[in-house]
Amino acid sequence: MQESKEIKALLHLIDDPDEEVFTTVSNRIISYGRGIIPNLEYLWENTLQDTIQERIEMLIHRLHYRDLTEDFQRWKTSSYHDLLTASLLVSKFQYPDLATSPVLEEIEKLRRNIWLELNSYLTPLEQVNVLTSIIYGYYNLKGTEVGYQHPDEFLIHKVIETKRGNTIINGIVYLLLSELLDIPVKAINIPRQFVLAYIKPELADEDNNKAAIDRIEFFIDPMSGQVFTQKDVMNYFNRIAITPSDIHFKPSNHIRIMQSLLEEFSKCFDNESNLYKKTELLMLSRMLSE
């Protein structure tokens, strides 16, 4: 952005020790939008004071976050809530300049490799075995327990780059590939877990008066792709002393899945220096439910 007299004056005031002045200056700078980021980056490169650099970094972050909020709002109001698009938006919270093309290309390669192994004669278990063997065998995706000390393990582009992610983001990769291939795998609401379920195609319609659990062929652990049974799930409920109900076995929609990802990701930022990130991620999650 061309540096007008006002912009020059605003940038000059970034180091003002008066917090009230700085707040006014910050808000005015933010009002220019992302076009002012190159000016801020140039100022950062030519500033020696750490405190001023931190202020500039925060201003740049606020500009990116404003754009991200608008992108999430557009996603929420779109006719189709694409999981890959929203997952990439979460990545952009940490990596605002992320190039998304490599991720899209890798997902398409995975989809194509799985599609080549599928045919209309496969049973549900055989379909899932193909998915699992390609994702966790051929592609070598590794699953980890959710660990809040590893924020990159919540981000889809890092999963594609390192082939390592936690159960939530690996589950999202599994889900979006299933959807691209018309395999009826959905996320369900098992407490304290991110679990997938193969929904019986003939019972997918919720108006069929069947209990939600009776619509499920089997369950899938996105950590490894391992299949498990209704009995295994019931044993888990007994272990955590929760009585299962219909809501636990109903498929989650994409908005709820992204809320879960944002909420869990926010737990990575709980020290004083980055607590603002936790607040921002939770604000994005709440915005999706409004």
Image (spheres, rainbow, N blue to C red):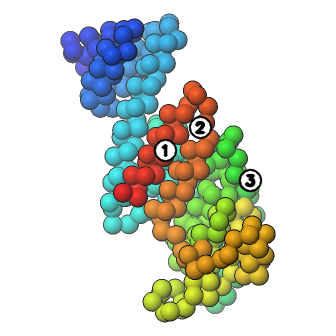
Q: Residues within 10 Å of mark 1 (few under 14, many from 20)?
A: many
Please state which of the two labelled residues, at mark 2 or mark 3, is closer to the viewer. 2
Residue 116: % across, % down: 62, 74
Q: Is residue 176 above or below residue 265?
A: below
Residue 202: % across, % down: 54, 92
Lateral position of residue 262 relative to residue 234, left or right: left
Residue 226: % across, % down: 76, 71
Residue at 52% x, 45% y is 91
Report how far apart the C-alphas of labels 3 and 1 lie in the structure.
22 Å
Mark found first going from the N terminus, 3 or 1: 3
Residue at 36% x, 40% y is 67
CB atoms of marks 2 and 3 within 8 Å: no
Q: Which residue reaches farthest left?
A: 5
Q: Is residue 240 visible?
A: yes
Please state which of the two labelled residues, at mark 3 or mark 1, is closer to the viewer. 1
Q: Amino acid at mark 3?
A: Thr
CB atoms of marks 3 and 1 within 8 Å: no
CB atoms of marks 1 and 2 within 8 Å: yes
- Which of the labelled discs sits on residue 134, or is there none? none
Lateral position of residue 80 relative to residue 118, left or right: left
Q: Amino acid at mark 2?
A: Phe
Residue at 44% x, 9% y is 46
How many labels were placed on the picture? 3
Q: Amino acid at mark 1?
A: Leu
The quadrant of the rendering that contains the C terminus is bottom left
Mark found first going from the N terminus, 2 or 3: 3
Residue with the mark numbered 2: 269
Report how far apart the C-alphas of labels 1 and 2 lie in the structure.
10 Å
Residue with the mark numbered 3: 144
Q: Is residue 218 above or below residue 202?
A: above
Residue 154: % across, % down: 61, 49
